[in-house]
Amino acid sequence: MPKPIRLTKADIKNFWTWIEKGPVDACWRWLGAHDKDGYPVFHPTSGWYKAHRVACFLAYNDAGSMTCHTCGNTGCVNPKHLYPGNGKLNAADRDKIPHGIHGEQCHLAKLTNRQVKRIVKLHKLGKTNREIADCISVRRRLVERVCSGETWGWLTGF
């Protein structure tokens, strides 16, 4: 579960200065730092947060367990393109938008399609995420992401 977002009035004012706003229906670009996955990050005095989560929180007073993009642009911080959601909703949105390469064809993939199917099978048999991770020789968090639909949802149906 992501940490709660805590911002001062000064943090909120500062947050909006890092956004290149365009037309109301267009993606808005974050001008600040980005993490290794390309997500914009905001560093107020209370720590750091993904900027799209802050934008969602400020617009809806909720960022969900996962903030979802309807536009498919991970760098977008336009609140009209964001909504508080979860792994399943995020995967469903992602799957609606045609992306080129995904799954094991992506050079960043840590799993093969076969491994993902095996994870799902073991999960349905009642194995714990730790047991599955040990069996597949991957991190437990990766197994959690597959079983929650946060990743590989197009293949697993989660």
Image (tube, grey):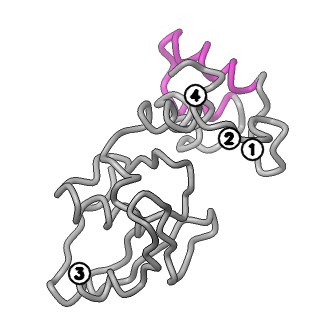
Q: Which mark is residue 153?
A: 4
* Residue range corresponding to the magenta coloring: 115-135
First of labels 2, 4 by sequence position:
2
Q: Where is residue 76 shown, x and y percent of the image?
A: 49, 63
Q: Where is residue 111 shown, x and y percent of the image?
A: 75, 37
| Residue highlighted by disc 1 | 110
| Residue highlighted by disc 2 | 138
Residue at image location 33% in from the left, 41% down from the top: 85
Q: Amino acid at mark 4?
A: Gly
- Give the distance between the C-alpha atoms of the residues marked 1 and 2, in whole angstroms: 8 Å
Quadrant location of residue 50? bottom left
Residue at image location 23% in from the left, 61% down from the top: 59
Residue 116 is inside the magenta segment:
yes
Q: Amino acid at mark 1?
A: Lys
- Give the distance between the C-alpha atoms of the residues marked 2 and 4, in whole angstroms: 18 Å
Q: Is 92 situated above or below 120? A: below
- Give the distance between the C-alpha atoms of the residues marked 3 and 4, in whole angstroms: 34 Å
Q: Amino acid at mark 2?
A: Val
Q: Give the crowd class for mark 3: few <14, some 14-19, many >=20 residues within 10 Å.
A: some
Q: Is 129 situated above or below 20? A: above
